Amino acid sequence: MDNLIFLKLGGSLITDKERPRTPRVDVLSSLCRQIADVIERDPNLILLIGHGSGSFGHVAAKKYKTRAGFPPLISPEGGRTSSFPQRGKGRMGAGAYWHGFTEVWHEARELNKIVLDSLRLAKIPAIAISPSSSVIANDGKVVEWNLAQIKYALSNGIVPVVYGDVVFDEMRGGTILSTEDLFMHLAQKLRPARILLAGVEDGIYADFPVRKHKVTRVSPASYPKISAGIGKSHATDVTGGMSSKVRQMLALVEDITEVTVQIFSGRADGDLERVLLGENLGTLLECD
């Protein structure tokens, strides 16, 4: 779709990642107002929103090692699923792992409710699409996802909202899929024109955390020269932080060459609106 945009509201942007379960309500309000303004100015815009879990899901996920999984030896259908060894004596048992799995689910859902409430206050017609109830993964990658609900929403002017969430995994038993993990699959099926990742950093730095050398454009060919300096998230981030996001998105633009990805800060009032309307802020990821 030529006018379809994927927009991620990063967990570090919409929550205080240094304080558990702390949303930045004022930031969310500003972001949603800007989105509403753009939708009013450009009624042909088609938007899919994703958001991270920030200080909600990541803390519990780290405690229970949810992303790593607890691989079953036998699948629900009765077949062998995994050659991974079960966790040994003295390590977390199945009961503790699956309790943690549900805790992360509750945390992710709570933040999603806050995001949806903020969109509603801005009069944006939006609906949550819960990955935990619709996605099956295999070793951390989506293998089953009925996208009919998302397609119906997009075709009827409703903004579908996905988010980092726990999912069942054929290999790991359970895991967490980040918004970028979900975007990787959705991009293959829906072919957006642009993917916008709004966070707290105003782009990619080749010397993070010094932040003296911002890179305005990155391609798969140029990435190896700067990869060592990109770094990870300062706060708890079980899905890998900036370096992981950049690698994923570069793999995507290399595979779908017509897609571009923009990494930028959503902190300054008005910047999200400018980016949605086509201005290049931050760092652009595109194929050579």
Image (cartoon, helix red, strand yellow):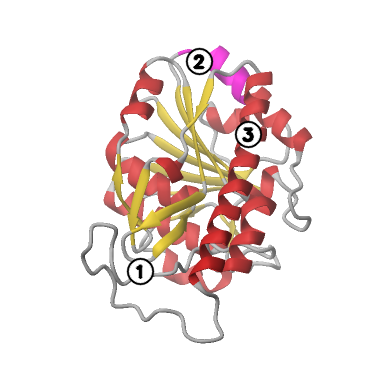
Sequence-wise first label, 3 or 2? 2
Give the residue pinned by disc 3. 113
Whether label 3 touches label 1, CB < 8 Å: no
Secondary structure at numbered mark 3: helix
* Residue at x-position 60% and y-position 54%: 103
Q: Quadrant of the N terminus?
A: top left
Which residue type does callout 3 highlight? Lys
Give the residue pinned by disc 2. 42
x then y, percent, for residue 178: 49, 52
Q: Which residues are magenta?
A: 35-43
Marks 3 and 1 sit apart, C-alpha to C-alpha, by 31 Å
* Residue at x-position 60% and y-position 52%: 203
Sequence-wise first label, 1 or 2? 2
Q: Relative to 140, is 269 on the left or the right?
A: right
Q: Is residue 33 magenta?
A: no
x then y, percent, for residue 249: 42, 53
Q: Relative to 102, is 224 on the left or the right?
A: left
- Above or below residue 75? Residue 93 is below
Marks 1 and 2 sit apart, C-alpha to C-alpha, by 49 Å
* Residue at x-position 55% and y-position 33%: 279
Give the residue pinned by disc 1. 72
Q: Is residue 10 visible?
A: no
